[in-house]
Image (spheres, coloured by chain):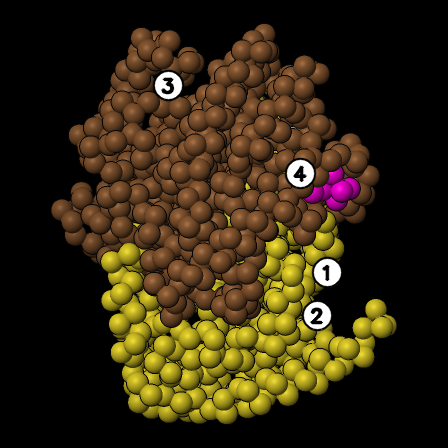
Chain colours: A brown, B yellow
Amino acid sequence: MLSRLPRVATLQARNASAIASQEPSAPSMKTAVPGPKSKQLREQMDPIHQTASVRMFVDFEKSFGNYIVDADGNTMLDIYTQISSLPLGYNHPDLVKAAADPKFITSLVSRPALGSFPRTDFPSGISHALTSIAPKGLKAVQTMLCGTSANENAIKQAFIWYMAQRRGGAPPDAAHLESCMVQQKPGTPSLSVLGFQGSFHGRSLCMLSVTRSKAIHKVDIPALDWPIAKFPRYKYPLKDNKEYNDAQDRECLKDVEEKIQEWKKKDNDVAAIIVEPIQAEGGDHYGSPQFFQGLRDITKKNGVVFIVDEVQTGGGATGDVWAHAHWNLSSPPDIVTFSKKLLTGGYYYADHLKVKEGYRIYNTWCGDPTKLYLLEKVVEVIQRDNLIEKTKSVGEKFQKALAELQASHSSKLSQARGRGTFAAIDLPTSALRDKLVDTAIANGLHCGGCGDKTLRFRPALIFGEKHLEIAFDILDKSVKQI
Amino acid sequence: MLSRLPRVATLQARNASAIASQEPSAPSMKTAVPGPKSKQLREQMDPIHQTASVRMFVDFEKSFGNYIVDADGNTMLDIYTQISSLPLGYNHPDLVKAAADPKFITSLVSRPALGSFPRTDFPSGISHALTSIAPKGLKAVQTMLCGTSANENAIKQAFIWYMAQRRGGAPPDAAHLESCMVQQKPGTPSLSVLGFQGSFHGRSLCMLSVTRSKAIHKVDIPALDWPIAKFPRYKYPLKDNKEYNDAQDRECLKDVEEKIQEWKKKDNDVAAIIVEPIQAEGGDHYGSPQFFQGLRDITKKNGVVFIVDEVQTGGGATGDVWAHAHWNLSSPPDIVTFSKKLLTGGYYYADHLKVKEGYRIYNTWCGDPTKLYLLEKVVEVIQRDNLIEKTKSVGEKFQKALAELQASHSSKLSQARGRGTFAAIDLPTSALRDKLVDTAIANGLHCGGCGDKTLRFRPALIFGEKHLEIAFDILDKSVKQI
């Protein structure tokens, strides 16, 4: 390790300056967004692939650092980062260099079925990329392709453990194996997962049953009869609303306990609870450390698997790699799922949840080595460049600037909230929120919404003070314009 | 296009010779499989990632063409190809060259959220990679990450269409949008998907409800009450068993019609049928063209979406890019799903199924451009090197050799069947099949099973006559040894 230090130091010097010198000094807009080239590409694609959700086409070769460049040459400061999934912004020099390594090329063209025939460097890749940032108290990890497959398999692993407990720890016997093929008990059990109002855990049919953020995700799709409990809806600033917010915590925890009992009576036991540290798609709703400690206590008491979905919150923007680290839980979550900024999907799980039999948590690819190796480099850069510490420091200024923005526009903005650079603010209506997003984009700040009327901030970990100034100048101007 | 021809010709010459000269001339075994290095890596990985399904660790840098090289330097002819997912074998020179292109590096390190901010070259990538090989009668395609997400979203699109039909084509109204948030009708409907005994469509909770290949996949996981119909179980050779097999077709089609009526009475309408052309995980069970034409007729008559799952069969091994092309259907399937050999997951769909509203068929990444661009090159190589035609020709010899192998070992082998190089043969028991797989691997032929007692053949499209000879020599020797 020592011999690498001088090389790392050189890289650091070069890359820090590379980002600073190659990044645009400010946004520069040439057309409306989407511009004529984006529109033309959309027309070209429309007969062969859906375009209903396409906002613009992007020139990923020209995009760099915190700046996204679209097909029409519009250069925007990006605080939306491909739906919160770029840890180091666009084309980070260290990642570009890493991705040229032959192991990336081999992994691309000769993709392994990782569950059965992993690459010889897969164990070290997991160790460097994932064990090194494992949440406190968890060590084992399962790679997957995306957040939805991470959540789906985390839930499967919870069901498998729950049923093994019912059998006193024994693997499935003949009665279970035979009955599951005709989907009868005991092999096919009635079990449920408890989710929360406002939550988002993915869009597979199973995950949609615990996703309650927006109707357009769920409408027309059949669902499972799984319980949904209340999630706190705090008033901000927190320090001025302690009594109200504490009551929210108590009410929601009571609802969780009641739902667990209710579903037990329906012979549809709650095997797992899945919860986001921040409901990041549903409108940036936070839970307090006390709320989550209460949840942990309830799951312990009821023998329910506690799954924390860090797909959007994981990766450092909250000032820790894991948002749940801020809770100081008495014991770690049973499972923590991730994707987005961590590039590979997957989940950490407690040792007692380990599945002994093969082919139960399994699929053809079980992930993608190219994403794991990239994450390895991302983790190295985050540590080398102190990006978590920097995000914490920029985050404090960010939250202050957000509060000031709200104070300057108190008729239009409310509920400023956040942690690190992971932040949000509310508009009075959905229409006004959408108008602010469009106006900010037209002014050179690429941003996006969440929930019904929330503007969400999801900058990369290389977002610094100069970006902060530009972002809030544009926001101030844009709020005035709407 | 014309200007590219000379370059292509040079590439062809060089690469044809490159594969021939760099590929080992025969397998060479140094240790048992798994060998000591694989075992050591397994021990290293066991505390941090599940290893229960790991067969061996692979040296993907040394593997080439049709040959896989494991961590211990064992060189095996591979007819399993990472669970049927390598179209051109290992490290094909054209793919290696393509993957070094800067657009791969940019796509890796600055991954787009394709549903909203696609790359400027995404429309042309879709056109070259996917439109160019679209199944007859289908043009629109949706990219996804894997086979399971392809099937999940295909089913969602079927539900969305089915409900729009109920509304006379109208989008969801307020009553639907509100009720779906509390999972009540009309927004959350009771709808089902009909699958078949022996089928495999993935391992998410929803897909497991129509997957019936093996108990170990399904046990302990809750399931949806969706109908399962009988799938033909033919006797081989087909020409000697026409009467029996035709009766199978009639019985299974009758069962499908009955199940559709039964579920309609339960107020759980069948919105879609999902079926594999060959039940490729469940034991290589085939349906005849008449059977599938019958299915197509039933779906038309009942207004049910007809989904053909070509995740394992698509990509050319059957002698056509699409196995369902052999059926000569009167009208195309409504949806065809794919993954594995096509490198990107996704599905083609008929124009009438197009979803008008955004964010309904959607997720963060909606696929991965690196896989699409690789597929673009794969398609180019397949066309340039006539690999489908060659597979058809090798396939005929393959089927003949398989029949001869069975004739030589008629007490141990039965039901030789296949199309192109996609083939299978049965052993008397599961234990004996596993023993044959292990013995063949020890003798230098890397293969795998499917179903209860079937050996499956899944060579790459570069599998030629010399590989055929080696494979069947090893099989003959191995069958004698078990």
Which label number is shown at residue A232?
Answer: 3
Tell me the CA gap for discs 1 and 4. 37 Å
Alpha-carbon span between mark 3 and mark 4: 41 Å
Label 2 is placed on what type of residue? Glu
Residue type, numbered disc 3: Pro
- The residue mark sitting in front, 1 or 4, is 4
Q: How many angstroms separate mark 3 from mark 2 (CA)?
A: 55 Å
Give the labeled residue for mark 2. B380
Mark 3 against mark 2, which lies toward the viewer?
A: 3
* Residue B375 x %, y %: 63, 63
- Which residue is drawn at the image coordinates 36% and 23% (left, top)? A287
C-alpha distance separating marks 1 and 2:
9 Å
Task: Kindly identify which residue carries mark 1.
Answer: B128
Pointer 3 local density, CA inside 10 Å: few below 14, some 14–19, many at least 20: many
Q: Are marks 3 and 4 in contact (CB under 8 Å)?
A: no
Which portion, as a residue range, is magenta? A69-74
Question: Is residue A292 one of those drawn in magenta?
Answer: no
Vertical arrangement, residue B121 with respect to residue B87, above or below: above
Which mark is in front, 3 or 4? 4
Q: Residues within 10 Å of mark 4 (few under 14, many from 20)?
A: few
Three-letter amino acid code of the residue under disc 1: His
State whether the magenta stretch is mostly helix, strand or loop: loop
Residue farthest left in this picture: A168
Q: Is residue A345 left or right of residue A133?
A: right
Marks 1 and 2: CB-CB under 8 Å? yes
**Along the viewing direction, whichever of B471 and B422 lies nearer the viewer:** B471
Do discs 3 and 4 share a chain?
yes
As measured in the structure, the alpha-carbon distance from the residue carrying label 1 to the one carrying label 3 is 49 Å
Q: Classify mark 4: helix, strand or loop.
A: loop
Q: B78 and B174: which one is in front?
A: B78
Task: Establish if A10 lies above or below B244.
Answer: above
Image quadrant for the N terminus of chain A? bottom left
